[in-house]
Image (cartoon, rainbow, N blue to C red):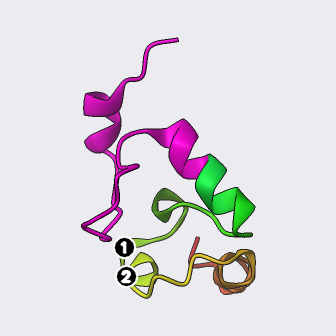
Amino acid sequence: MECKKDANLKNCNCSYEPCDRKGMCCDCISYHIKKRALPACAFPNDAEKSFDRSFEHFARLVSENKV
């Protein structure tokens, strides 16, 4: 399967500049799941900038109808 990095970057809201996984969704998801977290694209921009991408943070946002 060919990576669609250029197309993926158009929708990537990750604000962590030195990230070497930007646009490579399979690598990004794999990395975050191992850390019990979700990638930036699962969060609204304001929540993503906190860099708290934990499952728990996501659950709080869902319960507050912010996701």
* Callout 1 amino acid: Asn
Q: Residue at x 69, y 69 (%)?
A: 35
Q: Is residue 6 left or right of residue 1?
A: left
* Callout 2 amino acid: Lys
Q: Are marks 1 and 2 in contact (CB under 8 Å)?
A: yes
Q: Nearer the viewer, mark 1 or mark 2?
A: 2
Q: Is residue 48 left or right of residue 37?
A: left
- Whether residue 45 is situated above or below residue 60 in the rendered picture: above
Q: Residue 9: x percent and y percent?
A: 28, 42
Disc on res. 45: 1
Q: Main secondary structure of the magenta part?
A: loop
Q: Residue at x 52, y 50 (%)?
A: 28
Q: Give the camera-side residue of 16 and 59.
A: 16
Question: Is residue 4 within the magenta segment?
Answer: yes
- Whether residue 7 is situated above or below residue 66 in the rendered picture: above
Mark 2 residue element = loop
**Mark 1 residue crowding within 10 angstroms, few (<14) / some (14–19) / many (20+):** few
Question: Is residue 8 within the magenta segment?
Answer: yes
* Image-quadrant location for residue 61: bottom right
Q: Residue 62: x percent and y percent?
A: 69, 76
Disc on res. 21: none
Q: Residue at x 66, y 78 (%)?
A: 54
Q: Give the camera-side residue of 63 and 46.
A: 46
* Image-quadrant location for residue 55: bottom right
Q: Residue 13: x percent and y percent?
A: 33, 60
Q: Is residue 9 left or right of residue 61?
A: left
Residue pointed to by mark 2: 49
Rounded to the nearest angstrom, the CA distance separating label 1 from label 2 is: 6 Å
Q: Residue 7: x percent and y percent?
A: 29, 30
- Whether residue 39 is situated above or below residue 66 in the rendered picture: above
The magenta span reads 1-29
